[in-house]
Image (cartoon, rainbow, N blue to C red):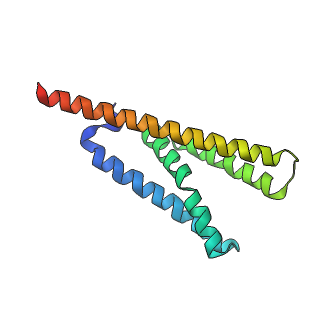
Amino acid sequence: MKKFDCEKNGEMIKAFIISVVMFVLLHMVNVAQGMTLMDAWIQSVATINVGIIFSIIYLATKNFAIIAFWHAYIDFNLFITKFGSFPITHKISIILDVLIRIIFVMCLICLGIKIYKNYRRKKVGKNF
């Protein structure tokens, strides 16, 4: 796939790391909303998995809309849970957390497979 071209693998990894770090650091602005520095840091570190998932999805699809809608869904779920509008919100929060973890593992597996295939293709190409 052109999107995961081995020759541009270094650029992809750089973009990946920068995007995850920016995603995490942008969550530190919650200090301005009254969150303590420690709570904002804990929240920021907790967003690493989601930032990695979003980066992988964007790098694979080049489609920002997918991650924007997914982020909105996560924020909406957190909003509902925070205010306790519905009695089932705790269960929804647990389900969302489990889904995020499953998707995180799946994305890492897919990324690993793509990188491995590109590596094998490049290695085989050098032998011929």
Question: Furthest-left residue in view?
Answer: 128
- Viewer-side residue, 46 vs 79: 46
Where's residue 4, x and y in %?
A: 34, 37
Q: Is residue 51 above or below residue 38?
A: above
The single residue placed furthest to the top in the displayed view is 128
**Where is 58 relative to 17, above or below?**
above
Query: The C terminus appears in which quarter of the rendering?
Result: top left
Say which residue appears at 71% left-offset and 41% top-offset: 95
Q: Which quarter of the image is occupied by the N terminus?
A: top left
Q: Quadrant of residue 36?
A: bottom right
Q: Is residue 80 left or right of residue 34?
A: right
Residue for point 24% across, 29% down: 121
1 left or right of 41? Answer: left
Residue 121 vs 107, above or below: the answer is above
Picture coordinates of residue 108, whole percent (x, y): 46, 40
Q: Is residue 6 positioned above or below 16 on the image? A: above
Residue drawn 24% across the image and 41% down it: 7
From the top left corner, tell me how far across and down residue 105 is, in percent: 52, 40
Residue 60 is at least partly visible in this image = yes
* Residue 62 shows in this picture: no
Residue at figure coordinates x 69%, y 43% from the top left: 96
Give coordinates of residue 49: x percent, y percent: 54, 51
Side (left or right) of 62 relative to 14? right
In terms of depth relative to the viewer, which is nearer, 10 or 68? 10
Label total for image? 0
